[in-house]
Image: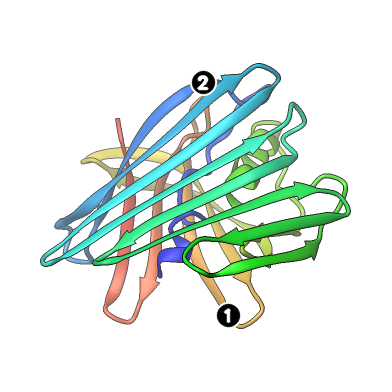
Amino acid sequence: MRDWWLILVATAAWAAGPKEESTRYQISWPSGISLGDGHLQATKDGDKWKFTLKLEAAIPGFKVEDSFQSTVDGKLCSLELVKESTHGARKAKETSTFSAPTGTRVTSGGGGRSEFPVPACAHDALGFLFVVRDELAKGKVPAPRQIFFGAAYDVRLQLVGSERVIVGEVPTETDHFKIAVKGPSSRFEFDAYFAKDEGRTLAMVRIPFAMGNFALEWVR
């Protein structure tokens, strides 16, 4: 589950590329009770952008914290992705760098080093979400493509249509998308709802699990 936090969060849009931001989300159990919080930041660093996503879940007796930082160039092509996690007593850190035609992944704690082929403009998962935001703001549904998040994954967005959803007890007009993700040994879908505001903010994500649909909602 932990490897999907990143893909399930924070796909909003801008009219002309990213802007600095700090956006909060609430993660809820199927019952509606809060499970934890998410925090997305975008900051300009010279001619580069740094995108950071931090998630904390309040599971009794088990600490869950995930942090992701993506560094991209001015064209939103990925340069580096750093993943850090604390799940109970287990801690992990992984750093992927992208320099076509080869990407490199280094895992702490004896995980080793590996290389993989990448295109001229590769997209890590978090960086790709900001690419999606830019394209949605221009009125386009992003074409299917490959992203990198440790392994390579194929991602497809399908527009379902307009839908009003309740976000923080406020009726919100959104565009509803189904997002399909396929990896080397896994496949799943989730629903994302983008507010029809200027920023096309991600208003809600619904994630299906055996025990029910978990929700991630924008905190205004």
Tag on residue 186? 1
Type of amino acid under label 1 = Ser
Percent position (x, y) of residue 169? 21, 41
* Vertical comparison of 211 with 144: above or below: below
Percent position (x, y) of residue 4? 47, 63
Helix, strand, or loop for circle 1? loop
Badge 2: few (under 14), some or many (20 or more) residues near its Cα, within 10 Å?
Answer: few
Which residue is at the front of the view, 68 or 196?
68
Q: Residue at x 33, y 82 (%)?
A: 210
Type of amino acid under label 2 = Glu
* Vertical comparison of 187 with 99: above or below: below
Q: Is residue 132 visible?
A: yes
Tag on residue 20? 2
* Vertical comparison of 134 with 153: above or below: above
Compared across the picture, whether 207 is left or right of 16 comes to left
Which residue is at the front of the view, 173 or 47?
47
Looking at the rendered structure, the number of numbered marks drawn on it comes to 2
Badge 1: few (under 14), some or many (20 or more) residues near its Cα, within 10 Å?
Answer: few
Percent position (x, y) of residue 67? 41, 48
Which quarter of the figure is the N terminus placed in? bottom left
Which quarter of the figure is the C terminus placed in? top left
Compared across the picture, whether 165 is left or right of 109 comes to left
Task: Looking at the image, tell me whether mark 2 or mark 1 is earlier in sequence order.
Answer: 2
Proximity of marks 2 and 1: CB atoms separated by less than 8 Å:
no
Quadrant housing residue 184: bottom right
